[in-house]
Image (spheres, rainbow, N blue to C red):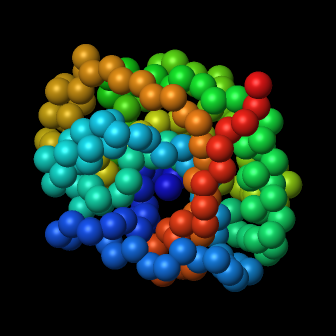
């Protein structure tokens, strides 16, 4: 999860050769762990994006496809974080989020991503609402709504992705938030999903 750095840490995932084993959901994360909030992408988009990343040789290809909204906030009160995410979800309406083409964070980070073309303002408003209260912090990178296509692979591969994904468009209905916790061991543990219930 990150604003511009692609997926610096793996999400837990289920099954499959080379995937990160899924630990038990962190029902009681500890103070000092980091929080992440994402929009999970549904099928068939998740499978296609996983195939794109795997085809590029991305070692994090098994990371479930997502759009990161908040990451890296060090949490002192997880009950407050859960309630905050639930409260934001309760007043946020679902929205269509569309992507078009490819862009890159190079030379800052070796990432090629699918930029948001439809729903960017909605994503930014949701990011701002989430990054308040117990999730307030100083992010390492400015928020750029996107889905990672490849991270940390050869420059030539990233160049090829930029070209091959130029005309690709897809969209999904964003209707839930997923909350994760990282204990500093490189695994983002799922804490639950919250449906977007706003009118």
The residue under the point 43% across, 41% down is 41
Q: Position of residue 167 (x, y in %)?
A: 25, 17
Image position of 55 (left or right of 86): left
Q: In the rendered image of this protein, does residue 92 appear above or below residue 101?
A: below
Q: In the rendered image of this protein, does residue 88 appear above or below residue 25?
A: above
Q: For residue 137, what is the image quadrant?
A: bottom right
Image position of 142 (left or right of 32): left
**Can residue 154 be seen?**
no
The residue under the point 36% across, 24% down is 170
Q: Position of residue 61 (x, y in %)?
A: 27, 55
Image position of 114 (left or right of 192): left
Q: Quadrant of the C terminus?
A: top right
Image position of 47 (left or right of 76): left
The residue under the point 85% across, 54% down is 133
Q: For residue 155, what is the image quadrant?
A: top left
Q: Position of residue 92 (x, y in %)?
A: 74, 34
The residue under the point 21% across, 66% down is 16
Q: In the rendered image of this protein, does residue 1 appear above or below residue 97?
A: below
Q: Position of residue 193 (x, y in %)?
A: 60, 54
- Name the residue nearer the viewer: 68 or 198: 198
Q: In the rendered image of this protein, does residue 29 appear above or below residue 112?
A: below
**Can residue 181 be seen?**
yes
- Name the residue nearer the viewer: 175 or 37: 175
Q: For residue 36, what is the image quadrant?
A: bottom right
Number of numbered markers: 0
């Amino acid at each position: 999860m990150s604003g511009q750095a692609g997926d610096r840490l793996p999400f837990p995932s289920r099954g499959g050769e080379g995937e990160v084993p899924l630990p038990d959901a962190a029902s009681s994360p500890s103070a000092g762990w980091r929080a992440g909030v994402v929009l999970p992408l549904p099928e068939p988009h998740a499978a296609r994006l996983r195939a794109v990343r795997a085809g590029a040789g991305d070692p994090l290809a098994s990371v479930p496809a997502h759009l990161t909204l908040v990451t890296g906030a060090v949490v002192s009160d997880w009950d407050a974080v859960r309630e905050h995410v639930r409260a934001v979800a309760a007043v946020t309406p679902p929205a269509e989020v569309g992507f078009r083409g490819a862009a890159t964070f190079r030379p800052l980070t070796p990432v090629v991503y699918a930029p948001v073309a439809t729903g960017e303002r909605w994503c930014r408003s949701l990011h701002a609402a989430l990054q308040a209260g117990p999730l307030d912090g100083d992010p390492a990178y400015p928020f750029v709504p996107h889905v990672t296509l490849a991270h940390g692979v050869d420059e030539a591969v990233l160049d090829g992705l930029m070209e091959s994904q130029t005309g690709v468009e897809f969209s999904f209905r964003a209707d839930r938030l997923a909350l994760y916790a990282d204990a500093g061991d490189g695994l983002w543990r799922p804490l639950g999903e919250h449906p977007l219930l706003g009118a």
